[in-house]
Image (cartoon, rainbow, N blue to C red):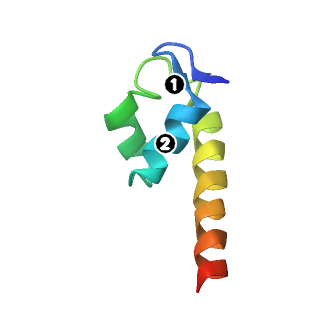
């Protein structure tokens, strides 16, 4: 699903960036340009970010 129409960024691209180490909206902005033009995607980007970070945390707890 497209999250940032201005730059053509999908939720899959955001999740991949998070898996590669981006953990803040600012880092995602720097890497993918989300939220850098009209800003309408920021809330949705934050939801994707929080969901993915929670998934990663749960996975790490299950391994430990």
Q: Residue at x 49, y 17 (%)?
A: 38
Against 47, is 33 above or below? above
Q: Residue at x 47, y 49 (%)?
A: 18
Image quadrant assignment for residue 15:
top right
Reading the chain from its start, which is encountered first: label 1 or label 2? 2
Against 29, is 21 above or below? below
Camera-side mark, 1 or 2:
2
Q: Residue at x 33, y 35 (%)?
A: 31
Q: Count the numbered circles shown.
A: 2
Tags 1 and 2 touching, CB below 8 Å: no
Q: CA distance from mark 1 to mark 2?
A: 21 Å
For the view shown, which residue lies furthest in the front direction?
Answer: 63
Number of the label disc, if any, that sits on residue 29: none
The spot of residue 39 in percent (x, y) is 51, 25
Q: Secondary structure at mark 2?
A: helix
The spot of residue 7 in percent (x, y) is 45, 16
Q: Quadrant of the N terminus?
A: top right
Residue holding disc 1: 39
Number of the label disc, if any, that sits on residue 16: 2
Q: Residue at x 41, y 40 (%)?
A: 28
Is disc 1 surrounded by few (<14), some (14 to 19) or many (20+) residues within 10 Å? few
Image quadrant assignment for residue 3:
top right
Q: Secondary structure at mark 1?
A: loop
Compared across the picture, whether 41 is left or right of 16 comes to right
Q: Quadrant of the C terminus?
A: bottom right
């Amino acid at each position: 699903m497209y999250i940032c129409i201005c730059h053509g960024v999908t939720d899959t691209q955001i999740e991949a960036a998070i898996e590669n180490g981006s953990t803040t909206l600012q880092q995602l902005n720097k890497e993918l340009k989300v939220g850098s033009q009209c800003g309408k995607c920021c809330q949705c980007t934050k939801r994707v970010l929080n969901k993915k970070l929670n998934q990663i945390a749960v996975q790490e707890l299950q391994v430990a």
